[in-house]
Image: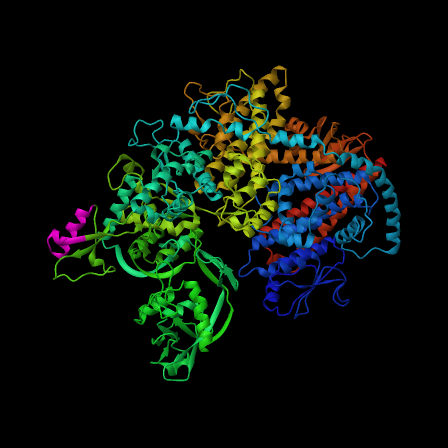
Amino acid sequence: MSNIKPTLLRQQHCHRKEMDTLYVSPHPDDLRSLLALIAAEYCPSPPHVVTGDPPAHNAKSRPTLLLANSDVVLTGPSAVGWYLTSGGKKGKRNVKEDSQVWQWLSFAENELIPLACAVVFPLLGVMGVDKQLQHSSRVELKRVLGILDQTLQPRTYLVGESISLADIAVTIAVLLPFKYALEPSDRKSLINVTRWFMTCINQPKFQKVLGKITLCEKMAPVVPKASSTPSATATATAANSAAAGGPPKTEAQLKKEAKKREKMEKFQQKKEMEQKKKQQPPSEKKSKPEKKELGVITYNIPTPDGEKKDVLSPLPDAYSPQYVEAAWYSWWEKEGFFKPEYGRKSLSEPNPRGIFMMCIPPPNVTGSLHLGHALTNAIQDCLTRWHRMRGETTLWNPGCDHAGIATQVVVEKKLMRERGLSRHDLGREGFIQEVWKWKNEKGDRIYHQLKKLGSSLDWDRACFTMDSKLSYAVQEAFIRLHEDGVIYRSKRLVNWSCTLNSAISDIEVDKKELTGRTLLPVPGYKEKVEFGVLVSFAYKIDGSDEEVIVATTRIETMLGDTAVAVHPSDPRYQHLKGKSVIHPFCDRRLPIVFDEFVDMNFGTGAVKITPAHDHNDYEVGERHKLEFINILDENGFLINVPAPFLGMKRFDARKGVLQALKDRGQFKEIKDNPMVVPVCSRSKDIVEPLLKPQWYVNCTDMGKQAADAVREGRLKIIPDHHLKTWFNWMDNIRDWCISRQLWWGHRIPAYFITVDDPSVKPGEDMDGHYWVSGRTEEEAREKAARRFSVPVEKISLRRDEDVLDTWFSSGIFPFSIFGWPNESEDLNVFYPGTLLETGHDILFFWVARMVMMGIKLTGKLPFREVYLHAVVRDAHGRKMSKSLGNVIDPLDVITGISLEGLHAQLIDSNLDPVEVEKAKQGQKSDYPSGIPECGTDALRFALCAYTSQGRDINLDVNRILGYRHFCNKLWNAVKFAMKALGEGFVPEKKAQLSGEESVVDRWILSRLCAAVTLCGAGFEAYDFPAITTSIYNFWLYELCDVYLESIKPVLNSQDGDGVKQASVCRQTLYTCLEVGLRLLSPIMPFVSEELFQRLPRRHSESSPPSISVTPYPESSEFCWHSEEVDQQMEFVMTVVRTIRSLRADYNLTKTRADCYLQCIDSDTGALVQKYSLQIQTLSYSQSIHAVTGADGDSGAIPEGCAVAIASDRCTIHLLLKGLIDTEKEVAKLTTKKGDLERQMEKLKEKMEKSDYKEKVPAKVQETDAEKLRQGQTELQKVKEAIENFQKMM
């Protein structure tokens, strides 16, 4: 059974009870078995693995999978692998991805494995060394891998964003070449394939099966080692069996191979000395190209800060980020290119191109850049630069958040470390002065990092959330919302950090998932504390011998229990209505309450209720009017509890309560329990729910307005799969606690009132009637006097010690930065803004609050669109974590860092020694040679290329390096082009068609226009991968690979017509360079500026001084795209690639051969004739001769040609004149004939099925018919070619 339907797989997995059994080959290098074994590692219910043959009545080959509890037997790596890897998928399957996986399975089995075996087996002594066959197979293998390399260029894995069966199958297919045949130079040319292969084989599940893989250093016959381990020959034998899928070899065959191995050993001994000489000492020559390519070239010309960089000196030989990125930013900034006023008389003057305004998500003042910041700023800067180049009045407003908790913690640690003082030693005012001092010394570090990323922010408008302008806006917002009744006082449960002595927001709580019993470190405790267990104990029923068993993960909280709850429908407890249980450690009676929140199927169906220390219990307590007993003070010590627990630390009490229950005989059991532990992200303390009087924002009405704004289309959220989250939050929004028990932050402008009048009873802290807000204490006192109708002198005020949640000031950031509530030109011009761009993880914490507060306080939405980018993960899809060693500073990617440097960063972190060692291993695995210098432009391009509109980005640093190589390609292309243009070149005043363009000029201009259209549409739709792909393809595959190669003969032409054509060609080349660099500028600002400044200008007098303020190309101007020309050139390139492949088959590296193109009709012949110069140049042919079908029959094509079929319209005949082996040619074509016949037979069989016409979609039927027609044409040509060669034999 070689195939299996996904539906059957799901059914079998649903019914699996016993273990399935997987039979694999005993040989460790059997490719088919390796695939199955790795797939088994990815199976949620791994099978039992048996090394050996399956039972004879079931199957004869391996791998074989016997499904438990069924008669189903699966054989073959594809079916077995599919079944095993699909076991973990739940719900609806992704049909598109499934289809892609099957295509890759076919690619591995039919394309890669035969070529890999043909190349490697001769090295391993299995086959005779047919050098010509081995060489041609190696060339073909590299060609196929080259296609794979292009496919992998924009992605980390073959299908989707994680390892799939496709990756497993193709990795196994290329395993032998990587081990024995692909030398370092080969791998360097296949950078994406190599990066992907290394990512796969370094996965723990791959390593478990494959062990450590040593890559090939030099392709040479492998010397068998006398040891107990299987020899390389045996490896090949196993692989051969795998590739062929046939039975084991006979004794006679093995003897014959043994003789061959003897001959090979003699051959290997001769070569052994040569290999040793090559291996020692390490040659310096090998490292030179790498050093040259990634060499550091610096810009050493003295340039005062803010002055323009020297662009008259020659460009260095190679691209170097340090050279390119020097000096530009300070010039851009000084010239005012980033200011909306640039090129405008007045901001208030209407701009017909429109306004673009976006504010930065303000980073924490304590922070330093991580890749999340880099992603945010790469996207935002691309958008900003694009809008600016379009001529819009553009403002990207920078700012920094005061980060209340984070900053206070940093400064407190600094004080204790340097001076041995706490904040309480200094007092509130003294401590705040210390924070300001720290901020003024260190707080602008992140601004410098943003500049390093090339962020085109208007720094003159930079804001800090504690600046007087923003602080006044925060105060005004609080007072207005308080006066409107939106802000109110209440005593409720909050997230409390005992270490910080403050409430914290939900976003500052990390949810640590535990699978069972776990010991965790807790600040203030010498020993680790136990979590992840469920403790069961009994409460005695008052006046009865009965008992009720309850369970809890926080046994110490039972000291605050005030009830036991059961479900109203639970028959086990109906007789306990109106009863109580007795608390074992005090005289408290706990009523048994009936509440539907209880799950009667969980545990005993009875739940202890602690209303003051659990969010669910709090609501039960409210519903049943239970007593709320707070058993914890702000430092985590027990209060309101009986001795001996009074005054204990909370987790010491955990042990004490457990022992006391055991002593009283009421303890029942303790067992592992998967759970989530809330951990404070700042202090690493365990968060406690605690009852505290706090200030809250009533979000009900504001949440409805925010939801309605999206429903009605006034606010657009992109991508739209976040809409469900938005509506879920907004429609079920809870009130927002905005009090924080800190000193650093915006102190709440609210005062508690005491009235010196016996007629007014004293108020309580939680009673909002006794609180008043004011801009000054005098204003607050006057408000209080009016409220209680007493003279001002009788009012005493106490200002709230707390500060506001940092998200409160962030929520009004879009308008507070412009001076709200005061009128200003900036507020009128730039509010509301255009766009808010940020990560989807703060959609609720920041975006929603900005929308709510913008509508409430200004009556306007703060922006029209919200674009949410994905979260950055590492290359393996793991969350960035210091303990994993995968947190990357973008500056390290820009400048490069050694492995030792990465290790040193871990030592400076707060990780414990075990985590440091684990993180080091992670770094060593991912970055064995450190991180090479990639530069800012490559990092930005990679981040944009990754930004598909999904939830996660798996960032691979090796791919960023690939874009550095792209920068080098740009560099070399422009250098060549400038030399081709010549010193006296003057571009036309306007880019337009002259009518004199050659076919290749017309084609490249068509492709340029297509790129312009794609980039414009990509920016409009926030489709950044579409932008990067179109730019990358235009520069690399169209301009460099085709156009620049095609025009070399034209540029060297000396005759009259040739000189005229060269002049037109130069204008076309200039247009491509100038427009191509403008397309690139928003994403790669540094290299595009460096190269753009070297080009002559169309209007030297009035041209903008910088590419950053030069108009972005638009499709209305570049409207020369032609589908017809594109299709013609696509046909031409198919012909060129076929000729190149044919040349490679015969190792014609330098020799140019005459080429005869046999065309099916006169139209095709005319097309070949039209592009003959381009075909000749790009295919390195001596001459090109177009021959129509009739001419070919009449002898126009000479004998002695190698034949290859480019398409059903054209056959290639390459004249070799005795340089070929005709027998080999016939063998090759016979093989192709057999392949074609099998493919067509399979297709005919499919099309002749009785239900084909009913079940198969019409479009597929059309495709199948076309495939059959093309196959028949191709088969006929193959037969003719065979006849042709047989005549020569």
Please state the horizontal and vertical placement of residue 1256, each as a whole percent of the image.
60, 56
The residue under the point 24% across, 39% down is 822
Task: Name the foreground residue: 269 vs 394.
Answer: 269
Quarter of the image for residue 94 reads: bottom right
Residue 1064 visible somewhere in the drawing: yes
As drawn, 1116 above or below 612: above
Q: How many marks?
A: 0
Quarter of the image for residue 1134 reads: top right
Judged left or right of residue 1200, residue 716 is: left
Residue that extends furthest to the bottom in the rendered view of this protein? 544
Q: Quadrant of the C terminus?
A: top right
Name the dominant secondary structure of the magenta segment. helix
Task: Name the colour scheme.
Answer: rainbow
Task: Name the foreground residue: 1175 vs 336.
Answer: 336
Please state the horizontal and vertical placement of residue 273, each as a whole percent of the image.
82, 36
As drawn, 658 above or below 117: below
Residue 714 visible somewhere in the drawing: no
Please state the horizontal and vertical placement of residue 1187, each as a whole percent of the image.
71, 31
- Magenta segment: 776-796
Reply yes or no: does residue 1194 show up in magenta: no
Quarter of the image for residue 790 reads: bottom left
Q: Quadrant of the N terminus?
A: bottom right
